[in-house]
């Protein structure tokens, strides 16, 4: 039985989707992340921004329980990494990234790419999952505007269609946490705008899971995202409410250039002064 204090800390952690305390990740003499504290609550939607090599993907891998910290403590969905079955934990987290994209067989049909995400988790409901899951997969394909591609093979899709398929797949298991690593990378302007609008709809849905989206561009921040973390060289430059964190000063500090941030309506734009 823990002390009163330990119980209080655990209660607090149970309310948090992600909690990092004094986290450091070291590889080959490099600090990929250093001295990082971060907390994500249930109803929050976070965007993580920072230059190439800042540690964004490393951070997402921690949140996806795909990596352990070298130092410090990481809690995901109330479970401490290192003390939990990560395979079980990963079924509660939806994750899309270039690496996931690379693992999908080209000949797999789009509906199956989405459906197969559920098999590991829902296998125990085998008697009923066929119809229910197919309906759920089709609903997600519709929500992402790709229902007409359900019978196509993944290898024949455009980059934008693949990104949307992977988001549908990540949502298939009803995750408690959705992690999106550069979902708009490689999309043309129309594709980006379409994806931003769909992610914005998702972000504003009170039933949607907590979200963390990694991006290189402030233009890709979907309206409805509430918080931002600015990383540079593995350190947090600023973290908190989007409007407090996204300032010309913070961006300039993170990217090491004199940048000017502008807001137009509910979107952000940045350029060098
Ligand atoms: N196994 C490793 N050994 C040594 N260095 C590594 C290893 N894996 C990653 N790094 C380095 O850690 C740093 C952070 O990598 P990470 O992929 O997290 O950055 P990122 O912010 O996602 O970058 P990008 O925007 O370019 O995708 C990079 O400088 C990278 O080269």
Image: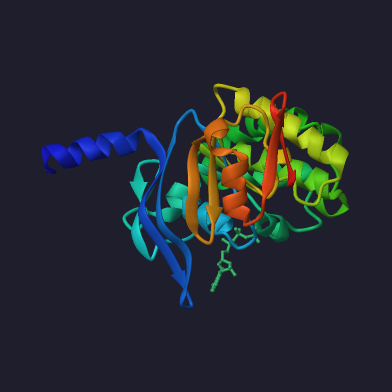
State which quadrant residue 223 falls in: top right
Q: Which residue is pictured at 61% across the width and 46% down the height?
A: 251
Residue furthest bottom as drawn: 28
Q: Nearer the viewer, residue 166 or 244?
A: 244
- Left or right of 233? Residue 22 is left
Quadrant hosting ligand 1: bottom right
Q: Taking the image as drawn, is residue 162 in sight?
A: yes
Q: Residue 88 at what x, y percent from top left?
A: 44, 49
Q: Taking the image as drawn, is residue 118 in sight?
A: no
Q: Which residue is pictured at 75% across the width and 58% down the height?
A: 105
- Left or right of 120? Residue 263 is right
State which quadrant residue 34 falls in: bottom left
Q: Residue 232 at what x, y percent from top left?
A: 55, 57
- State how the image is colored: rainbow
The N terminus - image quarter: top left
Q: Residue 193 at what x, y percent from top left?
A: 80, 35
Q: Nearer the viewer, residue 96 or 218?
A: 218
Q: How many numbered badges does the structure rendering display?
A: 0
- Left or right of 106? Residue 13 is left
Q: Which residue is pictured at 68% across the width and 47% down the height?
A: 259
State which quadrant residue 263 falls in: top right
Rendered position, 39 above or below 145: below
Q: Which residue is pictured at 80% across the width and 57% down the height?
A: 106
Q: Nearer the viewer, residue 42 or 95?
A: 42
Q: Residue 125 at what x, y percent from top left?
A: 52, 36
């Amino acid at each position: 039985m823990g002390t009163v204090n330990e119980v209080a800390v655990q209660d607090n952690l149970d309310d948090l989707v992600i909690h990092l305390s004094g986290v450091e990740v070291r590889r080959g003499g490099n600090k990929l992340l250093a001295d990082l504290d971060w907390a994500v609550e249930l109803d929050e939607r976070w965007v993580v921004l920072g230059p190439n090599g800042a540690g964004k993907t490393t951070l997402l891998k921690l949140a996806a329980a795909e990596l352990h910290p070298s130092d410090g403590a990481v809690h995901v969905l109330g479970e401490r990494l290192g003390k939990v079955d990560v395979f079980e934990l990963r079924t509660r987290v939806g994750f899309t990234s270039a690496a996931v994209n690379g693992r999908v067989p080209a000949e797999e049909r789009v509906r199956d790419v989405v459906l197969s995400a559920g098999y590991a988790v829902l296998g125990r409901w085998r008697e009923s999952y066929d119809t229910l899951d197919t309906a759920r997969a089709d609903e997600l394909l519709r929500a992402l505007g790709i229902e007409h591609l359900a019978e196509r093979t993944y290898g024949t899709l455009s980059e934008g269609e693949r990104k949307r398929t992977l988001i549908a797949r990540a949502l298939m298991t009803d995750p408690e946490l959705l992690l999106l690593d550069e979902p708009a990378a490689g999309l043309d302007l129309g594709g980006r705008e379409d994806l931003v609008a769909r992610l914005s709809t998702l972000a504003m849905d009170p039933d949607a899971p907590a979200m963390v989206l990694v991006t290189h561009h402030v233009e890709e921040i979907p309206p409805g995202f509430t918080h931002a973390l600015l990383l540079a060289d593995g350190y947090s430059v600023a973290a908190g409410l989007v409007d407090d964190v996204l300032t010309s000063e913070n961006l300039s500090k993170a990217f090491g250039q004199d940048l000017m941030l502008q807001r137009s309506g509910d979107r952000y734009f940045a350029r060098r002064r």
